[in-house]
Image (cartoon, coloured by chain):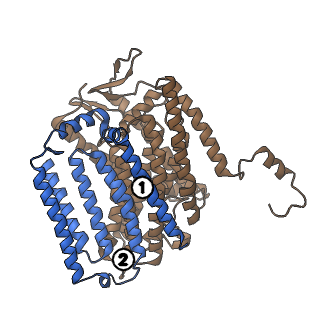
């Protein structure tokens, strides 16, 4: 059952990821991306990472993509989207970049086959124990606020800096 | 008594899905009737009373009408998204009900059945996730219509729903802190343990949650996306027949979910007030109703009449909030768009943040003092919250309704030469 569901989610994720690239209309590409994010959240649920799945949908699909949609709808209002597409040199560069990234991914996957990972090694039991003891949220929150509290706070400051920067940039036009 | 498992569990789950889904649809249909009857009552009219006794068959007549009506589709609309809009609006609104517990566990010959469709470990986050997807239906519908008014409605919807989601989420954090858990079954249990509904120890969170719920469901005074006096009818201007009805069903099922959620989070869910015989909770595989003085779990004995009673209480609490939604709609005028944004970002957000700090500090102090989690703990938090709530209301009111003694004197003895007010 779980295997079958995995293939359903994986097919949707890959199919809609292709949709993001090939869609002619930016809103179509955005909705495909939302579908990809939702399908990946489904895979997270199959991996027992319920909290991650929820956060993926709340933060990415529910907030960030809505802002994207907001911007896409306002920019290019009534324009012909086809004219914005770049051809020739740009598509070669895009292919090269994607190919390079895919190569890195394949290399990393091949390497991790013989080292302990999240799914195959000891990591699985430790995670199950943490889930059983602290629940879906506590299992993430505990390490985040104990072992990794300094990096966590640093990321918080980084985000604050980004927000302040965005406001400073926006203020110029107002 | 054992929890249900195996094939009977599968069958009982399917039965629950069918029952809850049809229940939600029926309640939604009759909420539309209630809306029309209550609005008529408030405006001193009679309202729909021709179809069936007291107009009780009106929703069925409405349903048949919207299916049989001609469907128009604007020539300049983008077809796919125009059809996708109502679907995306309706689905998230309907599936969120799955994680809300609606009665005490029901004993059957095959084992005890929990009265909740899916007790997922992330509980409330599941609801937040799906309700955050609800905005796509409205935004896509408005954009795809290719109509100025619909598009403006869609833009307002996206801005408003994203803004108030922040306040909604932050007001929930205090609830999570007090309950120490995110699943809704656990929250009902914590309120039974505390002998106090969270509406009292977390009164300000309750207030913020209710206000943001109105904004999230796009109900007056926050119905910016529709605003019929400014935008025709906003995002669903171009929709007709059943597609229009689907937006309607989405709005009312959103209302129903929000009401059930408020009842569960702040009014104890299916808990019957001033009674402990109905309490039931799974504790290490056994159904218990609490802990004895020595800390040993006391076994609960589920019964079908307890399930029935608790369901009735849950329905009453949810119905109260539904009526409240309707009453507010026909009482308050609509906000201006900039006022909505101002309230969301400059009032609700900072208040929610400050309240989290205050409650976290009070809980920390109470824990340090060594007060056990119970009635006294709840009362102490109620005191702190009451002060916060009174201050907040006083600030919001800004001397308009509640005046200080000095202000009242100034009004009753106006200065003769002062110009204006």
The chain letter corresponding to brown is B
| Residue B93 in view, yes or no | no
Q: Answer above or below: position of B29 versus B191.
A: below
- Measured as percent of width and height from the top left, residue A173 is found at 53, 74
- The residue where tag 1 is placed is A158
Q: Tell me the CA gap for discs 2 and 1.
A: 50 Å
Which one is in front, A5 or B226? Answer: A5
Q: Is residue A140 above or below residue A8?
A: above
Pinpoint residue A10: horizontal percent, then vertical percent: 17, 58
Tell me: A109 left or right of B285: left
Point 35% across, 19% down: residue:
B298
Task: Name the residue at 51% across, 28% down.
Answer: B366
Element on which disc 1 rests: helix
- The quarter of the picture where residue A148 lies is top left
Q: Which residue is disc 2 drawn over?
A: B72
Q: Position of residue B384 (x, y in %)?
A: 58, 35
Mark 2 or 1, closer to the camera: 1
Quadrant into which the N terminus of chain B falls:
top left
- Characterize the local packing of mark 1: few (<14), some (14-19) or many (20 or more) Cα atoms within 10 angstroms: few
Report the side of B84 relative to A108 (left or right): right
Q: Percent from the top left, x then y, of residue B24?
A: 36, 50
**Is residue B112 visible in this depiction of the protein?**
yes
Chain A palette colour: blue
């Amino acid at each position: 059952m779980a295997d079958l569901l995995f293939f359903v989610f994986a097919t949707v994720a890959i199919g809609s990821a292709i949709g993001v690239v090939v869609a002619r209309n930016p809103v179509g590409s955005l909705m495909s991306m939302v579908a990809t994010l939702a399908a990946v959240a489904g895979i997270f649920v199959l991996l027992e990472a319920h909290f991650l799945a929820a956060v993926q949908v709340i933060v990415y699909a529910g907030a960030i993509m809505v802002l994207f949609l907001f911007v896409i709808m306002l920019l290019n209002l009534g324009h012909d989207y086809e004219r914005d597409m770049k051809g020739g040199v740009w598509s070669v560069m895009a292919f090269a970049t994607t190919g390079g990234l895919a190569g890195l991914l394949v290399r990393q996957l091949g390497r991790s086959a013989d080292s302990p990972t999240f799914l195959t090694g000891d990591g699985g039991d430790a995670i199950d124990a943490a889930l059983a003891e602290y629940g879906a949220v506590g299992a993430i929150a505990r390490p985040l606020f104990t072992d990794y509290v300094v990096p966590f706070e640093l990321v918080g400051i980084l985000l604050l800096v980004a927000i302040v920067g965005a406001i400073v940039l926006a203020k110029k036009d107002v | 008594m054992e929890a249900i498992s195996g094939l009977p569990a599968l069958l009982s789950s399917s039965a629950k899905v069918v029952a809850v889904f049809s229940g939600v649809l029926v309640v939604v249909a009759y909420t539309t009737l209630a809306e029309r009857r209550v609005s008529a009552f408030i405006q001193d009219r009679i309202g729909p009373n021709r179809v069936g006794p007291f107009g009780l068959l009106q929703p069925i007549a409405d349903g048949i009408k919207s299916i049989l009506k001609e469907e128009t589709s604007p020539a300049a609309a983008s077809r796919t998204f125009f059809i996708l809009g109502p679907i995306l609006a309706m689905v998230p609104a309907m599936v969120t009900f799955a994680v809300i517990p609606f009665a005490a566990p029901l004993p059957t010959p095959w084992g005890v059945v929990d009265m909740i469709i899916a007790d997922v470990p992330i509980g409330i986050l599941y609801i937040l996730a799906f309700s955050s997807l609800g905005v796509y239906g409205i935004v896509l519908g408005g954009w795809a219509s290719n109509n100025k008014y619909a598009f403006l409605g869609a833009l307002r919807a996206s801005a408003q729903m994203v803004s108030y989601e922040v306040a909604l989420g932050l007001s929930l954090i205090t609830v999570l802190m007090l309950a120490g858990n995110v699943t809704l079954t656990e929250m009902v249990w914590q309120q039974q343990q505390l002998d106090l509904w969270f509406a009292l120890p977390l009164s300000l969170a309750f207030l913020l949650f209710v206000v943001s719920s109105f904004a999230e469901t796009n109900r007056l005074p926050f119905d910016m996306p529709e605003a019929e006096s400014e935008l025709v009818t906003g995002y669903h201007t171009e929709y007709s027949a059943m597609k229009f009805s689907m937006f309607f069903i989405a709005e009312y099922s959103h209302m129903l979910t929000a009401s059930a959620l408020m009842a569960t989070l702040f009014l104890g869910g299916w808990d019957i007030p001033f009674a402990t015989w109905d309490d039931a909770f799974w504790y290490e595989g056994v159904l218990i109703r609490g802990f004895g003085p020595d800390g040993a779990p006391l076994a609960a004995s589920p019964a079908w009449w307890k399930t029935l009673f608790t369901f009735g209480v849950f329905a009453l609490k949810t119905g109260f909030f539904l009526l409240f939604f309707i009453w507010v709609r026909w009482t308050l005028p609509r906000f201006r768009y900039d006022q909505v944004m101002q309230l969301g970002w400059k009032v609700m957000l900072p208040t929610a943040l400050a309240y989290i700090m205050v409650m976290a500090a009070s809980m920390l102090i109470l824990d340090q003092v060594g007060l056990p989690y119970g009635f006294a703990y709840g009362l102490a938090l109620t005191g702190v919250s009451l002060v916060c709530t009174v201050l907040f209301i006083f600030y919001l009111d800004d001397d308009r309704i509640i005046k200080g003694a000095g202000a009242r004197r100034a009004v009753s003895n106006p200065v003769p030469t002062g110009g204006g007010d």
